[in-house]
Amino acid sequence: MYNPISTEFFDQLTVAMQRKIPSNIEYYQNEEQEKKQEKQQTKALVKTMEVIDGFEFVVLDTQEKIKLSLVVTFNGKRHRED
């Protein structure tokens, strides 16, 4: 089921991208890690956002693509409950 991100989260991503703010992201790499509660962390610049196969992703300067629905915190702000 498609679950769009909040406008507040979208705005935070946009500001970080436009101002080239190094961002701390805590996330699950995939649904399997989500089930096991195995979070990942990274610090990188947000390059762009894109939709792949109907899912929203953030693309980082490290070439990582993170599914936005799997982001737990972005720059210390929680965006989902575990």
Image: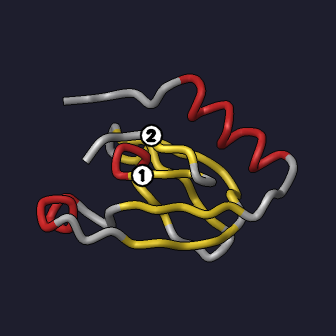
Q: Quadrant of residue 79?
A: top left
Q: Nearer the viewer, residue 5 or 24?
A: 24
Q: Which residue is rendered at x = 39% and y = 72% of the image?
A: 40
Looking at the rendered image, the disc whose residue lies closer to the viewer, 2 or 1, is 2
Q: Is residue 55 left or right of residue 66?
A: left
* Residue 56 marker: none
Q: Nearer the viewer, residue 38 or 3?
A: 38
Residue 33: horizontal and vertical position, in percent?
Answer: 20, 68
Q: Which amino acid, by three-letter code, is at mark 1? A: Val
Give the labeled residue for mark 1.
71
Placement of 55 over or under 40, stated as above or below:
above
Give the labeled residue for mark 2.
79
Total number of numbered labels?
Answer: 2
Q: Quadrant of residue 2?
A: top left
Q: Is residue 68 left or right of residue 36?
A: right
Q: In the structure shown, which secondary structural element does the residue marked by tag 1 occupy? A: strand
Q: Which residue is rendered at x = 14% and y = 65% of the image?
A: 32
